[in-house]
Amino acid sequence: MNREQDPASRPLRSYVIRQGRLSKGQKRGLLDVLPQFQFPESSLSSPQQAFKNEQPLILEIGFGMGDSLAEMAAAAPGHNFLGLEVHAPGVGHLMIEAERLHLENLRVMNVDVWSVLPHLPTHSLAGLQVFFPDPWHKKRHHKRRLVNSDFLKTAALKLQGDGVLHIATDWQPYAEQIIELIETQSDLEFCTPPARVQTKYERRGLRLGHDVTDIAVTKTAKH
Ligand SMILES: C[S@@+](CC[C@H](N)C(=O)[O-])C[C@H]1O[C@@H](n2cnc3c(N)ncnc32)[C@H](O)[C@@H]1O
């Protein structure tokens, strides 16, 4: 792992690890269920081998409590889903759902995206989803935002020719920043956002009266 790719050496993290007690269910999810859904680090260079069937792979970054990811995976058995989340209670919660729904097309890792994304093969993702990344409202924190030009460049490399990067946010200034960044990146072009499931954080934003923006891009050079 070189310095650029090692999350520990990145100047700022896009998250703060929140302490908080694990519920009994989340603890069981992490201890008893996670082993059967864990994506092994050894499969990063060949991600399909971690799944039962070889089929288009969707990566979701920051799934939170994971209910929307579980719902999407259950509704799309012809796709494989890899979910990444640094917040352990969310991983535990998703595990309980994954067990209940018998999801054979879902794998997860309780890690920072930067310890995964750079190691996936180029052109390996049919989709990359980032739903409601932490908005980091204050100007001095903007440099912590996950979606920056470094992220967009890496995402473009990992997407298949017709793969789609789908970002949703309820924070208008962040949406504007993302759109501006994409406009300066010649290897990405806007496309119609795919349908998706409403997320927990999205419901919170809507209760607060926020507008939600969905941004989707595909690659300009389709190879
Ligand atoms: C605002 S929450 C949204 C959660 C969920 N997508 C939703 O819409 O309900 C953002 C999530 O991204 C996760 N996150 C932030 N930076 C991350 C990173 N570098 N790698 C993995 N997860 C990350 C956070 O822990 C948090 O759970």
Image: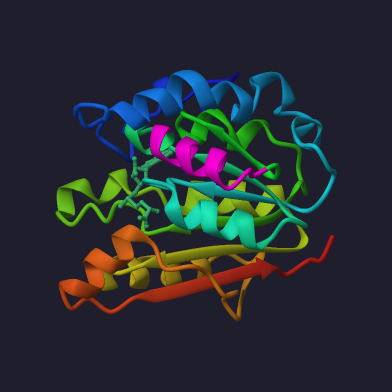
Q: Residue at x 60, y 74 (%)?
A: 194
- Choose top left, top right, bottom left or bottom right for residue 75: bottom right
Q: Residue at x 65, y 54 (%)?
A: 156
Extreme-front residue of the structure: 100
Residue 94, relative to residue 217: is it above or below? above
The foreground one among 82 and 37 is 37
The quarter of the image holding the C terminus is bottom right
Q: Residue at x 21, y 32 (%)?
A: 18
Q: Is 97 one of the magenta-colored residues?
A: yes
The quarter of the image holding the N terminus is top right
Q: Position of residue 124 (x, y in %)?
A: 76, 46
Residue 132, relative to residue 107: is it above or below? below
Q: Is 202 one of the magenta-colored residues?
A: no
Q: So how many labels did they put on this image?
A: 0
The foreground one among 55 and 101 is 101
Q: Assign the magenta stretch its main secondary structure.
A: helix
Q: Residue at x 36, y 54 (%)?
A: 133
Q: Position of residue 80 (x, y in %)?
A: 71, 48
> The magenta stretch spans which residues?
92-103
- Choose top left, top right, bottom left or bottom right for residue 89: top left
Q: Position of residue 17 (x, y in %)?
A: 26, 30
Residue 84 horizontal side relative to residue 37, left or right: left
Q: Position of residue 140 (x, y in %)?
A: 16, 48
